[in-house]
Image: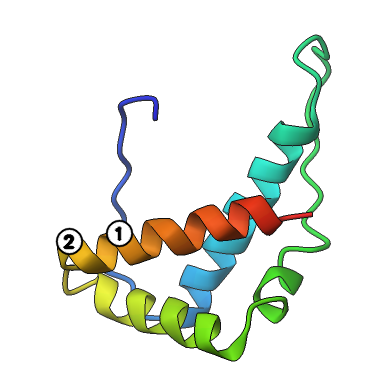
Amino acid sequence: MGGQRLTIGPIKNLEFAFVLLGRALSFQRAVFLRSHVNRNIMLVNNDHESTWLNRLTHKQQLQHTRLVQQGYKGLSEQDIQLFNTLLCKLLADNP
């Protein structure tokens, strides 16, 4: 959203991709719950970063895995739309 893009890889280890996604969800949650007037150092709690995957249905887990596996080769426009939809659902469901 800020107009910058960070590209790393290709990394073929699926676990690493899911760890990064879990940490991104943890950071998003911490920012979402933080008041804009709070100027203290923000601490991100990573306790739940592995549980988000367990909340997905088997079908959703397979979709995420397929997209991550295919990602280093390049995703089609349809796959990018599916990935965006899945990420938006994760963000909405992230407690």
Closest to the observer, 74 or 43: 74
- Is residue 9 visible to us here? no
Q: Mark 2 Cα within 10 Å, few/some/many (few <14, many 20+)? A: few
Quarter of image, res 35: top right
Image location of residue 53, percent across then percent down: 65, 75
Residue 88 as seen in the image, left or right of residue 83: right
Q: Is residue 36 above or below residue 11?
A: above
Image location of residue 70, percent across then percent down: 26, 79
Q: Is residue 14 above or below residue 72?
A: below
The number of numbered discs placed on residues in the rendered structure image is 2
Residue 8 as seen in the image, left or right of residue 93: left
Residue in view at x 70 percent, y 33 percent: 31
Amino acid type of the residue that numbered disc 2 sits on in the rendered structure: Glu
Image location of residue 76, percent across then percent down: 16, 67
Which residue bears the numbered disc 1? 81
**Quarter occupied by the N terminus:** top left
Amino acid type of the residue that numbered disc 1 sits on in the rendered structure: Gln
Which residue bears the numbered disc 2? 77
Quarter of image, res 32: top right
Image location of residue 81, percent across then percent down: 30, 59
Query: Do labels 2 and 1 touch, CB within 8 Å?
Result: yes
Give me the C-alpha separation between circle 2 and circle 1. Answer: 6 Å
Closest to the observer, 83 or 7: 83
**Quarter occupied by the C terminus:** bottom right
SS state under label 2? helix
Q: Mark 1 Cα within 10 Å, few/some/many (few <14, many 20+)? A: few
Residue in view at x 45 percent, y 76 percent: 64
SS state under label 1? helix
